[in-house]
Amino acid sequence: MDDLDAHVIDLFAAEPRIGVLEASRRLGVARGTVQARLDRLAATGVVTGWGPDLSPDALGFPVMAFLTLEIRQGSGHDAIAAHLARIPEVLEAYTITGAGDMWARVVARSNADLQRVIDQVLAEGGIERSTTVIALAAQIEHRVLPLARAAAATPGQRT
């Protein structure tokens, strides 16, 4: 990551439908340079997608909760993850350290609907119990752009 990479990412994040030619004009570099940067950022996994960002709230799922799952020993995280992946309201799931074994971010249409989602999650026999925390308000939405800018500001500082 360097300064130009950060500017390319910022521009395409702000205006995802901008063309490479217009981006090159705004950035003051050759069209081929912008395309090469985009290709490299995608090939190295820095840019992971170009699809639209969707709002669960606008789709009718305004309730967000975080589930901490305790998994029965020997059940395997992969089987639990496969089960969770089949539930559309599960947006993310991570294996974690600490009090639980897996963390999942879920959405629901209402608090009552959240119970249905939790029941679906718990239908997997490998999950012993869950603890639920309902999100009241987003203070900082999921973001990565500040991290990209920080990486560009300190090139070579990887650990």
Image (cartoon, rainbow, N blue to C red):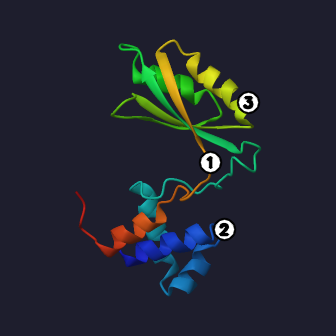
Residue drawn 47% across the image and 26% down it: 69
Q: Is residue 37 visible?
A: yes
The one nearer the camera, 107 or 31, is 107
**Label of residue 136 in the image:** 1
118 w.r.t. 133: above or below: above
Find residue 56 and report its horizontal and vertical position in percent: 69, 46
In the foreground, 1 or 98: 98
Viewer can see residue 1:
no
Q: Residue at x 60, y 71 (%)?
A: 14
Q: Quadrant of residue 33?
A: bottom left
The CA distance from mark 2 to mark 1 is: 33 Å
State the mark number for residue 17. 2
Badge 3 crowding class, 10 Å Cα cut-off, few under 14, some 14 to 19, many 20 or more, is few
Residue type at mark 1 is Leu
> Closer to the camera, 58 or 49?
58
Q: Amino acid at mark 3?
A: Ala
Q: Secondary structure at mark 2?
A: loop
Residue 39: x %, y % from top left: 46, 63
